[in-house]
Image: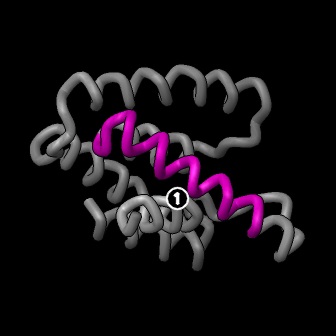
């Protein structure tokens, strides 16, 4: 899973795109190899899929690749690990927008940083 998150982060940083193949591989990992309990994975899917879909439709600020990536990661990691990683990612995103003066961030790259910090701590 770490390699998939790292790869998606690097691709998103360079091209600002998250390939569907990586999302499919993350979902496959979630189904067959994830060590997160099944209720954590189901909660991760439900807690991200529905609210992010509504947010994407109503605001248009979340792109399809970002949406699929976040839902896949939440499903693979489980809700607990995902939320903690996302909390660190939000801090990184705030710093990114302050330093770079950009309105948008490469989401997979930022999430990769949050996941890395969570994994180290």
Q: Nearer the viewer, residue 38 or 14?
A: 38
Work out which quarter of the rendered image holds the C terminus and state it.
bottom left
Does 54 sit above or below residue 85? above
Q: Nearer the viewer, residue 62 or 114?
A: 114
Region of the chain picked out in magenta, as a range: 76-95
Count of marks overlaid on the render: 1
Work out which quarter of the rendered image holds the N terminus and state it.
bottom left
Residue 12 falls within the magenta-colored stretch: no
Does 59 sit above or below residue 70? above
Q: Residue furthest front?
A: 121
Please provide percent x and percent y for residue 10.
48, 76
Residue 90 falls within the magenta-colored stretch: yes
Please provide percent x and percent y for residue 90.
65, 53
Q: Residue at x 57, y 48 (%)?
A: 87
Q: Which residue is mark 1?
A: 111
Q: Residue at x 51, y 60 (%)?
A: 114
Q: Residue at x 52, y 58 (%)?
A: 111
Q: Residue furthest right?
A: 101
Residue 37 falls left or right of residue 12: left
């Amino acid at each position: 899973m770490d390699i998939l998150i790292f790869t998606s982060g690097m691709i998103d940083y360079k091209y600002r795109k998250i390939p569907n193949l990586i999302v499919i591989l993350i979902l496959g990992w979630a189904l067959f190899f994830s060590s997160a309990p099944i209720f954590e994975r189901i909660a991760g899917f439900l807690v991200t899929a529905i609210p992010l879909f509504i947010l994407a439709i109503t605001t248009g600020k979340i792109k399809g690749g970002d949406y699929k990536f976040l839902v896949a990661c939440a499903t693979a990691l489980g809700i607990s690990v995902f939320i903690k990683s996302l909390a660190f990612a939000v801090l990184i995103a705030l710093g990114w927008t302050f330093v770079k003066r950009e309105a948008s961030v490469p989401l997979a790259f930022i999430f990769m940083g949050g996941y890395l910090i969570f994994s180290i701590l």
